[in-house]
Structure formats: C-alpha cells, structure tokens
Image: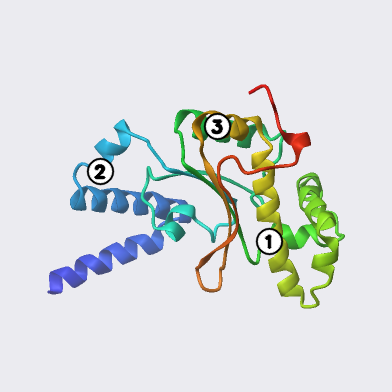
Amino acid sequence: MCRTIKTAYCILNTLARMKSFEKLLQNNKNWASDRIKNDPGFFNRLVNLQMPEFLWIGCSDSRVPANEITGTNPGEIFVHRNISNLVIQNDLNLLSVLQYAVEVLHVKHIIVCGHYGCGGIKAAMDNISMGDLDKWLVNIKDVYNLNKSEVDAIENEEERLNRMVELNAKHQLLNLAKTTIIQKAWKHNKMPHLHAWAYSLSDGVLRTVFDMPPGSPIDKIYEFDNL
C-alpha cells in the first residue's frame, strides 16, 4: 500500500514539473499503453485500414472535439475543422478533404456541425475589424444578410446568435450540395447523406438542424448536367 502511494506521488510530482507540451507527450504514451492493454490488436487494425462512414466538417473550437462528443474511435470519423465550420467553394483545403472522403473513402454521411457560443459567429455579427480574419468572417455576414429579417426579429442576443449558428450550419450544407464533388457522387453512387447539426456547450447534446438526402433538389443554376 505504501509503495503504491509513493509511486503515485512520484508520478504526480513528475507531471507537476513537466512543461505543458511534455504532458501531452506523456498523456499520449499513457493512452497508447492503455489501448494496447485493453485491445492488443488496436493499432495493427488502424495501420492497415481506414474506412470511416462519416466526414465531419466542424469548428476549430477546442471545446468541440468530433471523436469525443460522438463517442467514436480513431478510424471511424474523418475530420476537417476551420473557424465556424465554413464550406467555401474556393477553399482548396476543404475541397481536397471533401474529394478524398467522397471519392476514396466513400463516406456515407457528411456532417456540418456548428456550436452554440461560437466566437466566429459572434465576431461576424459585430462591426469591429479583426484584420485578415475579416476575409473569412464575411462569409458568415452573407448568411446573416440572407436571413436578416428572421434574425433581427429575435430580441434576445444569445438566442439571436444561437439561431445564426443554426442558419450558418444549414447554409454551409447547401454550399456542399453545390459542389461538383457532391453532385457527382449523388448522381453515380446515391450518397452521401448531408446533415447540419448544432452542438450545445452547455449540455453536450447535438441537435439536428437540416438534412439533405442524396439527390435533394437545389436551385437549378447550381446544378451541373455534364457530370
């Protein structure tokens, strides 16, 4: 008993002296060791196989980790994150992830997930310049302009921002449907199913905002006939 207490004290003492990044490395070693202990073949399976059913397009916010809030393990969900979970037609980073997820991994579902209390949404609704970030946030201002009457009718500021989170997630989902990548997949493979969700920091629950099954109609001007 005394030896166990002494060992635990030494570990805690060592952790206390570590720098923050060193703690991450130690946590990783502990995590890997626990994984092997509970499932000796875990890493062998990961090395040889990646077949996620989901692509997650989420916010970079550190409080919204895709794996943890969905209860998924490594290898089960493919992830792309940026400020306020935007889908922008000339964002080569996102489009590369999207193409790989759809055409190589053949994901069945794509989730665009916003979260209540999003700093990007709040910043976009203000008239204060954020420097280069303004070029990114203008996309959220466009969402506001498209829904100005509805949003302005909400008197409570928190509720107004929460509604903007939902409208933004829906709008980004519609942007996904406008890409040739999604339209081609819908035409030839009848997938993926698109989902817009919103995550609540206050209770940890995901809420459905909008769904687009494969082949959902979009404005004709955005459709491509030669895919």
Question: Compared with residue 11, is residue 105 higher up or lower down, i.e. above or below?
Answer: above
Which-is-in-front pick, marks 2 and 1? 1
Rendered location of residue 56, percent (x, y): 52, 47
Q: Is residue 86 visible?
A: no
Please give the residue where the numbered disc 2 appears in the rendered image.
Answer: 42
Residue 196: x percent and y percent? 60, 54
Q: Could you say whether the residue bearing mark 3 is in a helix, strand or loop? A: helix
Q: Amino acid at mark 1?
A: Val
**Left or right relative to 24: residue 145:** right
SS for dot 1: helix
Q: Which mark is residue 165?
A: 1
Residue found at the far bottom of this picture: 156
For marks 2 and 3, give the one nearer the viewer: 3
Q: Nearer the viewer, residue 27 or 21?
A: 27
Which residue is rendered at x = 81% and y = 54% of the image? Answer: 141
Residue 114 vs residue 1: left or right?
Answer: right
* Tag of residue 214: none
In the image, 60 versus 99, the foreground residue is 99
Which amino acid type is shown beneath numbered disc 3? Ala
According to the image, label 3 marks what residue?
185
Using the rendered view, name the quadrant where residue 183 is placed: top right
